[in-house]
Image (tube, rainbow, N blue to C red):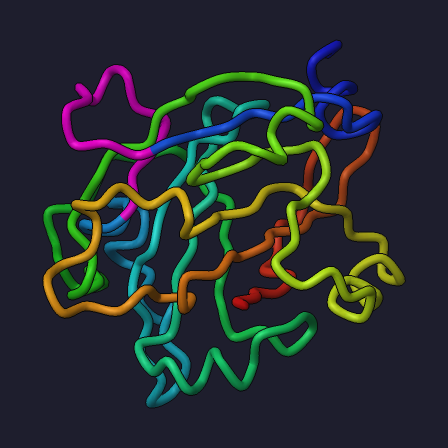
Amino acid sequence: MENYANILAERKVCILYEAGRGLSTGQSTGWIGGNAPAYFDDKADAIQEGDLGYYFYLSLIHPFKPASMISIFIPNDYEKYLEHNQYPDCSIKVMEHPMTDESSSDRFAHPGLIKHLISHRETCSDLHSMGQSFLIKFGGSPRLVQDEDYYSAKLREEGFSFLFQVDEDGYPETLLREDSSYPFAFGALYIYAKITTNDVQDPVAGFWQFS
């Protein structure tokens, strides 16, 4: 678990991911856009909240639990998650679940995103990552759009630590459909979790920011 310690304890190292359309499924570590994992085919009630519908955003194979995925769903009403953008009132859903293939159902498909596969680009020093473009940064320290302590204060108070971020600066040019907007206003989403010396539990949407 040396990499685990370097990435999630000492935070000297991180994993960077990118998205592309020319990858084979065997090369991928998840996908952004497209249909939700088949795991959610019979779990719509766990996603929807009353009249508030949700879109699938992305799924990432957990780098330290290869039989698990972390999936993210965002409300279909931008104003809802703009208003509720910070833990414990963040309306974005993050779920860890058994790894499954993409569903054939487009029930949760985001109309503004074209499916791209996610792949591991490099494992590098946290310092090096700060100057890089990436779709996902797993571990290390968050690269914040707004370096304000109040965003993470409640998370830290309740024992959560930074797990990964999704950064729209790392979107490939072909990800957004024509005339579609960036889901996070060309910003970044930060995922936190309960992290011990050998396990990651309870991933949650910590907050999202844009400049």
Horizontal side, residue 61 vs residue 107: left or right: right
Give percent across and percent down for residue 181.
26, 69
The residue drawn where x is 12% and y is 54% is: 105
Number of numbered markers? 0
Give percent across and percent down for residue 151.
74, 67
Q: For the N terminus, which image quadrant?
A: top right
> In the rendered view, would you say 53 is above or below 11?
below
Q: Residue furthest bottom?
A: 51
Give percent across and percent down for residue 35.
19, 51
The residue drawn where x is 54% and y is 68% is: 211
Horizontal side, residue 164 vs residue 162: left or right: left
The residue drawn where x is 78% and y is 20% is: 5
Between residue 176 and residue 85, name the one nearer to us.
176
Horizontal side, residue 17 vs residue 118: left or right: right
Q: Does the magenta portion include 157?
A: no
The residue drawn where x is 30% and y is 34% is: 19
Residue 135 quadrant:
top left
Give percent across and percent down for residue 49.
41, 81
Horizontal side, residue 119 vs residue 201: left or right: left
> In the rendered view, would you say 69 is above or below 175?
above
Between residue 28 and residue 168, name the one nearer to us.
168
**Magenta residue span:** 19-32
Q: Residue furthest top?
A: 2
